[in-house]
Image (cartoon, rainbow, N blue to C red):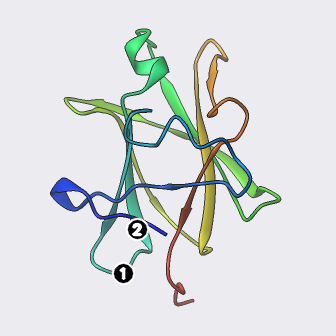
Amino acid sequence: MRQQTDFGYTQPTMVPGSHPSPDPVSAGIKVRPLWGNDRNVTIVYNGLLYRAGAQQVYLHTGYGPNWQSVYDHRMERTSEGWQCTINLTEDELHFCFKDSADNWDNNQGNNWCYRTGTIPH
C-alpha cells in the first residue's frame, strides 16, 4: 500500500518479508506517478550514495519478485537529488540504486518495491 506525501510523491513499499527500516522517506526515496495513470513515474533519490557524493547514480530495476527485465537507468542530478522518470510496463517494480564505482544502496539487501494499479497495455 502506498502513502501519499507532499508534492504528489508516494512512498514505495517494502518488499514482503523485508526489514521495517529504513522507511523509504528516511532512506531518501520518493516516487511520483505522472499524468495520473501510474504508468509513468519519477523516482527521486537523495539517500546514502547521494550523501556520499556519488558522481553518477543508476536506478537498478526489475519487474515482479523475480526481477524480470532488469535494467540500469542513468539518473540525472537535480536540486532534489538524483532523478529518473520511467515508463512502467508491469504493476510491480522492484528497485535499488548503484553508483559508477559499483557501490549499492539496496536497503540492506531487501530492495524497494513500487506497486501500481492495473496498467493498461
Q: Which mark is residue 37?
A: 1
Nearest to the observer: residue 58 or residue 115 = 115
55, above or below 68, in the image? above
In the picture, measured across the screen, residue 35 lies left or right of residue 65, that is left
Instruction: Tell me the kind of residue under disc 2.
Output: Asn
| Farthest front residue in view | 20
Q: What's the residue at 41%, 75% (across, down)?
A: 38
Residue at numbered disc 2: 40
The residues bearing labels 1 and 2 have C-alpha atoms spaced at a distance of: 7 Å
Q: Assess disc 1: are there few (<14), some (14-19) or many (≥20) residues with their C-alpha within 10 Å of its C-alpha.
A: few
> In the rendering, at what x and y percent does residue 31 appear?
38, 54
| Type of amino acid at the residue the image marks with label 1 | Asn
Residue under the image location 35 percent in, 59 percent down = 10
For this rendering, which residue is in front, 21 or 34? 21
Quadrant location, the C terminus? bottom right
- In the depicted structure, whether residue 80 falls above or below residue 51: below
Quick check: 70 left or right of 101? right
Q: How many marks?
A: 2
Give left or right: position of 49 versus 89. left
Contact (Cβ within 8 Å) of mark 1 with mark 2: yes
Instruction: Look at the picture and state if 9 lies above or below 34.
Output: above
Q: Quadrant of residue 78?
A: top left
Secondary structure of the residue carrying numbered label 2: strand
* Element at label 1: loop
